Amino acid sequence: MLLLAAVVSLIEAPLGLPAVVDYRVPEGYRLEALPEGEGFSALSDSAGLVTLVPLLLDTLALPDLRAVSPEDTVHLRGPVLLVVPLLPDSALTPADLPAPAPMNIPPGFPSDYLLRLAFWIPWGAPPRFPYLPVALGAAVCAGAAWFFISRRRRGAASPGPDSEETGSSDSAVLALLESEAFVHGDWKALYARMDTLFRALAARRFGLGNPALTLLQIEKAISRERGAGGFLAKAAPLMREITLQIYADRGSTRDRSRGFIETLAELYRGGRP
């Protein structure tokens, strides 16, 4: 036996929000699942109460569903959803502006109002350029720059504390023949002392007082000096030997080391034997 429920209900539902629809299932009947539609999305159903979300701003007629029981089947007419928007649309009429518009302008001439905006009148004339303080500041900066540059040049040209410590003669160099490093064969310490003495000589004679220079850089700097050919011819083998002994731990003998000490002493004497 088939029964048709002809009762049609109209339900308002907000767009995009879940709404509950009652199919009014008779007691003892079970409602079939609601299929997906174009204008809505079904979430769940329980005892004839179907939860769905409207997706179109329109009047949606839900499909008819069957409710079954062990003895009978009933066709239930689907309700109609009237989908309403969440926000007001453009059909709202704005309020009219007041007419005539209020013109709260005090009496007077335009110049009376412009004077209130002329801030330069109470401020007065702009100040003059401070020529004297700027000139004094520039003079102080120039004097300080000249002082530091001249001091740096004097420091670079001075022989430095090593040369003052070792003296200006070859006696300090020949004293290495009686040092503990020479006697015990500590060649690395011996040539480190010779490196100090040679740098002091280069600083005094050629103004190469920069301790960051390597011996190779010192050799290149000396080669650019006028009349330094004889000095460099004697000093080049000594510089290479100092580099090998300090950084490569080459090893030496007393006779070989005595020869390099005498070469350094001859360089201190200015090339005279």
Image (cartoon, rainbow, N blue to C red):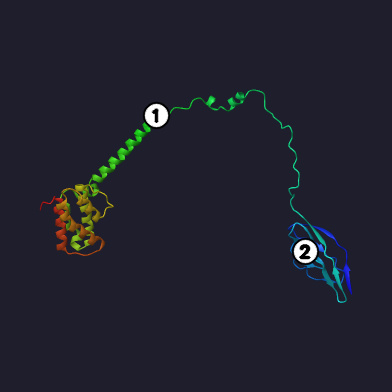
Using the image as rendered, state which of residue 227 and residue 238 is in the foreground.
227
Within the image, what quadrant is residue 82 found in? bottom right
Using the image as rendered, state which of residue 242 and residue 42 is in the foreground.
42
Q: Residue at x 20, y 53 (%)?
A: 198
**Residue receiving disc 1:** 131
How many marks do you count on the picture?
A: 2
Residue lying farthest to the left in this orientation: 273
Could you say where residue 184 lies in the image, as x and y percent from the top left?
Answer: 20, 63
**Residue receiving disc 2:** 51
Residue 188 appears in the picture as rendered: no
Q: Which amino acid does label 2 sit on?
A: Thr
Q: Quadrant of the N terminus?
A: bottom right
Q: Which residue is drawn at 37% across and 33% down?
A: 137
Q: Which of marks 2 and 1 is in front?
A: 2
Dot 2: within a 10 Å radius of its alpha carbon, few (fewer than 14), some, or many (20 or more) residues?
some
Q: Which amino acid does label 1 sit on?
A: Tyr
Could you say where residue 172 lies in the image, as x and y percent from the top left?
Answer: 17, 52
Say above or below: 260 vs 5.
Answer: above
Using the image as rendered, state which of residue 189 and residue 38 is in the foreground.
38
Could you say where residue 123 lies in the image, as x and y percent from the top left?
Answer: 52, 26
SS type, badge 2: strand
Using the image as rendered, state which of residue 90 and residue 73 is in the foreground.
90
Say above or below: 112 vs 212.
Answer: above
Could you say where residue 157 lies in the image, as x and y percent from the top left?
Answer: 23, 45
The residues tagged by marks 2 and 1 sit, at their Cα atoms, a distance apart of 85 Å
Q: Residue at x 22, y 53 (%)?
A: 220
2 or 1: tag closer to the N-terminus:
2
Dot 1: within a 10 Å radius of its alpha carbon, few (fewer than 14), some, or many (20 or more) residues?
few
